[in-house]
Image (spheres, rainbow, N blue to C red):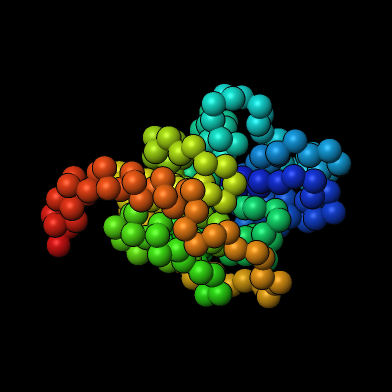
Amino acid sequence: MKICAIIITHNHEDIISDLVLRCRHALEPDVLLLDARSTDETLARAASAGAIVLDSERGEGDSLINRGLKAALELDYSHAVLVWAHRSDICIPEEIPRLVNTAWNRPDGIIIGVDENGRGNLWTSLSALRPLGAQTSGFRLYPIEETLALQCREEGHAFDAESLVRASWAGIPTAPVPVNTRPSTPSLQKPLFGQLERRLLLGMLRRLPRLLMRRLAEI
């Protein structure tokens, strides 16, 4: 396995240098930057700290994250840890080795950093037909080729939920890993049952016979 960290950012010039350096300490020197069109000094400061800035304008039909994963794959990385700059209270670089250590035993799976204060979503777990835990953490290690094959369409944190549900449909395993987090002010939560949950639930119902056969075979 060749593992990188992909920092996803937008106008985080105040914290990006420190975040890049901390990620490089955990996965030196394999830190990439996926930027959502920052208008401040984020790109320059990240590059000065040693990050490789990815081309986020390719493949207009892709989500931003898929573009980043494809760019990482072209650089010969097999796995990527997603680090959201605006959730640096959850995506703590010092916790990356916990995800990496688990990935060595499950190289085909998605490794989920579980925040004990995070909340799961009943509807996405139901759509996956298996418990998904605290999907709101957003701190994950993905096998790149397997994740791209899921053809996820969502942007931002909705990608986290969609990728786990589609991974379940495809038979890709997931592995939760407890991670330490820092106290933060709770952010506003999206509706419990929104457009994404509705779409994933309908997708599950279309696949239900095949998924039930797989689950029965796993018992």
Q: Nearer the viewer, residue 216 or 30?
A: 216
Q: Nearer the viewer, residue 217 or 145?
A: 217
Residue ID at (86%, 41%): 40
Q: Nearer the viewer, residue 211 or 170?
A: 211
Q: On the rendered structure, is 133 left or right of 191?
A: left
Taking 159 as reference, is 148 above or below it?
above
| Residue 74 location (% of width, % of height) | 53, 28
- Asked if one can make out residue 114 in the rendered structure from this viewpoint, the answer is yes
Question: How many circles with numbers are drawn on the protein?
Answer: 0
Taking 136 as reference, is 163 above or below it?
above
| Residue 86 location (% of width, % of height) | 71, 56
Quarter occupied by the N terminus? top left
Quarter of the rendering containing residue 68 = top right
Residue ID at (48%, 44%): 79
Quarter occupied by the C terminus? bottom left
Residue ID at (42%, 50%): 198
- Asked if one can make out residue 172 in the rendered structure from this viewpoint, the answer is no
| Residue 14 location (% of width, % of height) | 85, 54
Residue ID at (51%, 46%): 159
Q: On the rendered structure, is 24 left or right of 76?
A: right
| Residue 97 location (% of width, % of height) | 54, 61
